[in-house]
Image (cartoon, coloured by chain):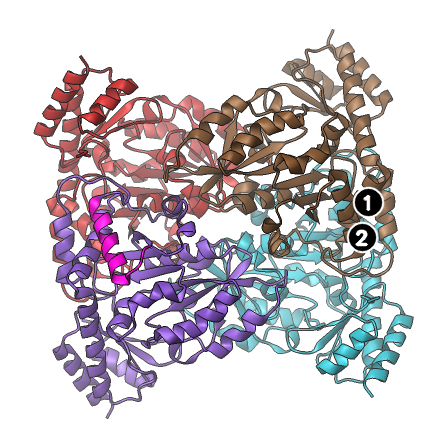
Chain colours: A purple, B red, C brown, D cyan
Amino acid sequence: MARYDFASDNTAPAAPEAIEALIAANSGFASGYGSDEISARAADAVRSLLDADAEVRFVASGTAANAVALSSLCRPFEAVLAHEHAHVCTDETGAPGFFGQGLGLVGLPGASGRISPEALKAPLAAPDFAHRQSPAALSLTNATEYGTVYTAEALAALIGPAKAKGLAVHLDGARLANAAASGFDLKSIKSLGVDILVVGGTKAGMTPTEAIVIFDRKLAHRFDARLKQAGQLPSKGRFYAAPFIGMLESGAFIERAAHANAMAKRLAALMPFAVSHPVEANAVFVEMDDRTLGALHAAGWFVYRFLDGSVRFMCSWATTPNAVDELGAVLADISR
Amino acid sequence: MARYDFASDNTAPAAPEAIEALIAANSGFASGYGSDEISARAADAVRSLLDADAEVRFVASGTAANAVALSSLCRPFEAVLAHEHAHVCTDETGAPGFFGQGLGLVGLPGASGRISPEALKAPLAAPDFAHRQSPAALSLTNATEYGTVYTAEALAALIGPAKAKGLAVHLDGARLANAAASGFDLKSIKSLGVDILVVGGTKAGMTPTEAIVIFDRKLAHRFDARLKQAGQLPSKGRFYAAPFIGMLESGAFIERAAHANAMAKRLAALMPFAVSHPVEANAVFVEMDDRTLGALHAAGWFVYRFLDGSVRFMCSWATTPNAVDELGAVLADISR
Amino acid sequence: MARYDFASDNTAPAAPEAIEALIAANSGFASGYGSDEISARAADAVRSLLDADAEVRFVASGTAANAVALSSLCRPFEAVLAHEHAHVCTDETGAPGFFGQGLGLVGLPGASGRISPEALKAPLAAPDFAHRQSPAALSLTNATEYGTVYTAEALAALIGPAKAKGLAVHLDGARLANAAASGFDLKSIKSLGVDILVVGGTKAGMTPTEAIVIFDRKLAHRFDARLKQAGQLPSKGRFYAAPFIGMLESGAFIERAAHANAMAKRLAALMPFAVSHPVEANAVFVEMDDRTLGALHAAGWFVYRFLDGSVRFMCSWATTPNAVDELGAVLADISR
Amino acid sequence: MARYDFASDNTAPAAPEAIEALIAANSGFASGYGSDEISARAADAVRSLLDADAEVRFVASGTAANAVALSSLCRPFEAVLAHEHAHVCTDETGAPGFFGQGLGLVGLPGASGRISPEALKAPLAAPDFAHRQSPAALSLTNATEYGTVYTAEALAALIGPAKAKGLAVHLDGARLANAAASGFDLKSIKSLGVDILVVGGTKAGMTPTEAIVIFDRKLAHRFDARLKQAGQLPSKGRFYAAPFIGMLESGAFIERAAHANAMAKRLAALMPFAVSHPVEANAVFVEMDDRTLGALHAAGWFVYRFLDGSVRFMCSWATTPNAVDELGAVLADISR
């Protein structure tokens, strides 16, 4: 039977802090659509995490959260600049274009999932041209798809030129907890100029939930109507808010991510294959040929080849040292 | 402090059977995006409930489920026929048009939320005309928005003529459990000719989850891609599937709805106001002037005026006889 | 063989002034996509007609012009208020929802195609509610679908309250020439607060062309990209601009419309049937039963029953007094 | 003053045959929206040109024609395969995604604008995957953006594998006349398996008009409603149909294109710069550095650098041998 321990950080169950908060929230009647007290308390917890005033909404899907965010920053005849391997470009079945009525995605290169500041120059310098979708927003991801982490300075080097050209900024924080545990300062996000942030709950160890954080209050006008129309205004909102209470108020959000990051480092240290990207969060990418990958699958471990051709191993809050060591032994075995 | 017991059936918490199944599902690693064993088992339970072969998917939102369903049955330059007060027409902020790229909604009249077979005749008889959106689908709701229930025969009287004209059929079953508990035969749905059914989990007492049931397999082609793009293919799919296992395998799905229906009957019996619609499911609608409604709010009970001008009281699995009686006493008091 | 003289004002050919300007424009090479000198000169003529500074674009389709305008004033989760029988609501196959990704249309009543100021009050007073599409724009039509004409004062009585609530204003001027010939002051449009105006060329006697006039320059940002994406940025733009030069610089735009209006008055005077709406522009609506309409068709004249149940006769620049008298005689005959 | 003779084939005026037919069509009243006799006759001429039964519609815009075609072949969560420099991918401001609600475009490589059969293999072989937009249609262009021409055999080598995988096929014939004049057999198109063809009128020397040809009649269901909603069902349809009558019935469609092609050959022969692509239709691409291009602009000739870095010179029906020779002399001068 296949084991999915390292296939993704969303194959893990929810952490005890999340489930317990969800159970605690399941008591009595509550007003609907995010107007309840649990949602208010969770929003406070998110604002506290970021040390920033902002509108906060809890939704079911990270893909939808990103797409709704981008469609509020970019009109259909405009484009979003993003890393060419960003989740919004490669792994959402065109959701930004669906929610954004055909908005364009312009993929930019950059090592290990971080957009190269050099690569950003050309699209920002290009004059508006009616026959192409000119950029209106910059989408960033931290931690990146390749398990690397932008520093606040590195983000500033991208956001500054983008803002100078009038672009809005979206930050996909599906793995923001891992970035924070790796040293990224969450309290810098607002001052960096991010307009809309998505804080990932699911990959951080919660039941399905994501927080949309709207720093620019003008963008929040009629946002609940936007969410409702997009199928992302849950009636029983408390079940999307509660896990954030459980994980944020206890500190588990960062602690659990720190554990996942540590497991990735442990796995990297055991790797008999060349590691493809710096291990700064909870992912390990390695060079592996098809025969070896097949042997790994045959041994019962499911992982897959990523866009850059390397094979990805994801750790989560639920990854145990034993599982890492067990996998390490199998890898050592098949690498011989 | 306001009490939301009768404001909606989604102000209730989740029933024990749902929560316990969710907790039970929160164990070990599972493959993502609905490919896990819990999702497979829940789909079996839904097929068994309906005694029908079908594709089943679990999603987070009923609004999205309906909108995705309609957009798969109707092209942008076509229209959906629905009751003029159906949820898809009045309470989803235009979600069908958003997911369906401007598809039209044609509202039809009919007493107490049921489309009048007479009213259906004109749109079905109208010749195609390029300047209007001609109908491609019929959307039905059971139980209806007004707490009434279609019999299988009543549905057949609408579906038959629609199918004869080539229309597809969508059934919004946000309160299908209540309809079933009221005598509607769930095993008739497939043979009635429904193409896509949405089985409501949330209002039936689950944590947020809805099942999309696709009877016509051709419609299921690339449906996961459709859901993913629409932000409705959850990575941790087990959390949307598990509550269905808990409620369906135990029989609680129907039993809990039967309780809700019984509470509505109990409340109706206590009503000092004229009841506006037959009480066949879990809702009681009454005629109440603004002063009286204000007095009810002042007494701490939140309910609201509906589209037809009457005031709606919803019962749920969590409604207690005591609460009904307590509310009855308050109503008796303010009606004097 | 059916005669289409009175079926619509778009069954007429193009007026000599339009065709001659088109032929004159067909000389030599010209830069594309509206950047040519003919387009610049036609834009000047439109600005002069309106005595207003504005961005002007020439497009092929009035339906598209309206839909593009509305989609630039209203987001998908918002709504446009319009007369319930306005072209955008009833005769464009849902184009506003298609271009506007599901934006809502709220039809308002009002006699003879003019929105009742009273009817506007409720939607403007309604509080924002996330489950419905709240209004973001008001769409007006002058002359109306029923051949009546708003005075500047009548428009002000609608635009004032709408602007006070933050709504933007669109004016569908498919028959603006007829309104002007009837006394409506075109130079009042900008000061009335209209944000986007569509000036009809086609029904005014041109080959297919419409002018989009953007008074609010902020709305013009990247408007060419918007048009290009919407299939409304013609490469050989001169052919859409030239007819406006021919009709506007010569004064034929108003004069030809005055003729059409006069023909409607002449026809109304001959009518043996009750006239349904004031004849203020180029339309005559009358009460006529099916038998009589059938007799008219049998006599070779094609006209059709309109939304309000009356039968519509449209006059155009090409309508001759002889044709009016000939039709009058037929009508007198069949009315006996 | 800048000369636009070689900037594009749409900077030319309309050919006499087109204008004369348009003037001839401008007589008397005609029924609207393409139901007139001129539109019927033009559709016959198109069917005769292609020696094929098909539905034919005349629309204003090639961008819209392509986008409407693709949106009828591909759902939002699917993708269109096209040459990476095809007009639909690079020069339409994302119109396919706008009309197709976010449908994906997958750009394929291939020398000189022709898709490499080798490059087509991978996307056709890729298994369906819910997280990416899987291909549903293949879009081809003949003549290509680089002035080359597919033979029927070359098209068959692409269409065959695509059809075998269930993809639909769109052919962008903006320069179909030039392809035909170069030897491409128009009568092969239907049997090749093309589902929807766009026959370019504008670049072939007409006033703005394009013909959409629907070979698969099932796709034509409610196509007029589709066009109307998309702003592409012109009320005065005769003005879009007439130029096709003028050009097709006279044979000018091919003859004028043959002239344009001959002018391109004449220009290529005079070129003092390396020619980048085979000159098979009406375009000449050459390698030219910025200094030289600047000198050409300074000499009053406007042409521009294309996507592949070469500079494009387009010839049209209106290009004179004198103009070619004049330009040749200028080029010879600045190349020294």
Contact flag, marks 2 and 1 (Cβ < 8 Å): yes
In the displayed structure, B81 sits above or below B309; it is: below
The magenta segment: A37-53
Residue A182, quarter of the rendered image: bottom left
Whole-angstrom CA distance, mark 2 to mark 1, is: 8 Å
Q: For the residue marked with disc 1, what is the amino acid?
A: Ile
Is residue B226 visible to the viewer in this orientation of the structure? yes
What chain letter is assigned to the residue under label 2? C
Quarter of the image where the N terminus of chain A is located: bottom left
Q: For the residue marked with disc 2, what is the amino acid?
A: Ile
Q: Which of marks 2 and 1 is nearer the N terminus?
A: 2
Is residue B127 visible to the viewer in this orientation of the structure? no
Residue D77 is situated, as x and y percent measured from the top left of the image, at 44, 57
Secondary structure of residue under mark 2 = helix
Crowd around label 2: few <14 · some 14–19 · many ≥20 (10 Å):
many
The circle drawn on residue C38 is: 2
Q: Is residue B138 magenta?
A: no
Quarter of the image where the C terminus of chain A is located: bottom left
The circle drawn on residue C31 is: none
